[in-house]
Amino acid sequence: MDVLAFEHHLTSPAGSGLLDDSEHRGSAGGAACGDLIDFRVELTGSRVTAGFAADGCGALTASGSAVVSLVDGKDLLEAALVSTEDVSRELGGLSAAKLHAAELATDAFHRALGSAAREVNLPEVKGRRLVAMSGGVDSAVAAVLNQGAGPVVADAPLVLGVTLELWRDTQTDAAASCCSHVAVRRAREMAHSRGIPHLTLDLREEFREGVVDPWLAGYKEGRTPNPCVQCNGRVRIEPMVDLAMSLGAEKLVTGHYARLVMEPGHEGKPLLREGSDPNKEQAYALARVPAAVLSRMEFPLGEMTKPAVRKLAGDAGLPVADQPDSQDLCFLAGVGREAFLKRHGGLDDVEGPILDEEGQRVGTHRGIHHHTVGQRRGLGIGGGQPLYVLRTDRETNTVTVASKDRIASVEVLLEDIDLRRDSSRVTSARLRHHATAVPAKVELSENGYGVLTFTSPVETVAPGQVACLLDGDLIIGCATISSHAA
């Protein structure tokens, strides 16, 4: 370690106390580690000015100063390449014990830089793409594929990276979440290892208001909402497309296994087509993304299989080639649904009766929010024929169960309907992610509802879930299963 370099930044910290009134801020650290750093960034054109305030150890102040020295006066996309390793080198090399300070300073700076980048207006560069990077293998391969496409433009990088931070909770397993500060750091390191400028968008407030709060409200009402469709359609994707335009990129690229189709007569209004790999199909999760937003997107993995993607990652030497896919909702990672509902939604267990269709008590439930329509396991009813949840009633705190044949239905009521083409084109519906599509048709009513009718009875779908409306493998629209009877 170069003690003189470290002492210089510690005793005469560059940028300390500057830009106090800037609205483009980013913080890192807190009570858990005892160190807190707050960065502020302003752009003049695309040139960066930075300042910070640190409360904690001397290494944190020195790291903040090092970041300012590395980015002041630099172009936005140059500053987006600054890494923790750069900060360590600027300080003459940090010991393992002090490297955490450099990580915090880098995290805070990139949050502030991402905020400022949303208001920049760089000229469009032909072939430039902004890649949504989650820190996983799919988005990393999407970035690598785009690095190999198109001519190299001097001083104008064609591939840029962005990662969203959507949730931060000390109870959550941040390493297992696709949108935590750990995932952001992992994605940034991946981008920098490939020479890709990387930006962070902090959308925690929007995610809480637009996804988590409605999800909690749905469970309080006895529904089982799908937060991923809501997140992509109304919170997550559009800000990244807007950022792509701000940075002069022609398209936003994601690692979703989905495809786009442009039909004659519908210019600028593409349809989603399901991905070719049925085991990884992800168009369902994108069904609510507005057509105008989809028209600015690309899905390079849409024709690929997961094994092929992993092989490409291995061939490219990506350390995430064998990284397992995340399986849980990002805000539930390491916590579990029941604990989350109690902590954030105030949904305590309140016992109540489990009834059969005649109203006879056959068991006791711990709380209706633990049960969803169609559920069989976890009811605690032993003996006799298998029983399934037919409905839940929040007002009476009851769960009604029935035999399997009784939970089947030939129609469901739809609400919050979003159609991209005429409803007459709907020939089938996918009622759960990765479920087999079933033949169906849609009839719309004047009150904003619709009825989804099936050719043969299907198991009742929980209210709040999303019905993806299909014409073959084209997504014509989507809707939410209503809690009211059809």
Image (cartoon, helix red, strand yellow):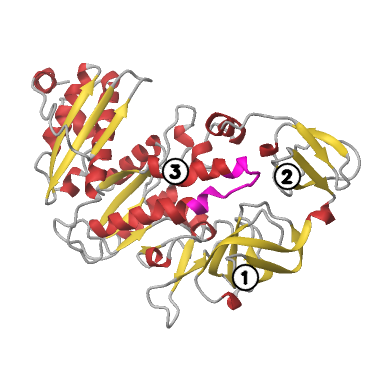
Q: Amino acid at mark 1?
A: Ser
For disc 3, the neighbor class at 10 Å (few under 14, some 14 to 19, many from 20) is few
Q: Which residues are magenta?
A: 218-230
Which is nearer the eye, 69 or 277?
69
Q: Earlier in the sequence, mark 3 or mark 2?
A: 3
Q: Nearer the viewer, mark 2 or mark 1?
A: 1
Q: Amino acid at mark 3?
A: Glu
Where does the image place residue 486, in percent across and percent down from the top left?
A: 71, 62
Tell me, yes or no, if residue 198 can be seen here: yes
Q: Nearer the viewer, mark 3 or mark 1?
A: 1
Label ID, residue 209: 3
Q: Earlier in the sequence, mark 2 or mark 1?
A: 2
For disc 2, the neighbor class at 10 Å (few under 14, some 14 to 19, many from 20) is many
| Mark 3 → mark 2, Cα distance in angstroms | 26 Å
Q: Secondary structure at mark 2?
A: strand
Q: Earlier in the sequence, mark 3 or mark 1?
A: 3
Where on the picture, by quarter, is residue 105?
top left
Where does the image place residue 442, in percent across and percent down from the top left?
A: 64, 71
| Mark 3 → mark 1, Cα distance in angstroms | 30 Å
What residue did someone put label 2 on? 392
Is residue 385 found inside the magenta-colored segment of the image?
no
Residue displayed at 64% across by 47% down: 223
Which is nearer the eye, 8 or 96?
8
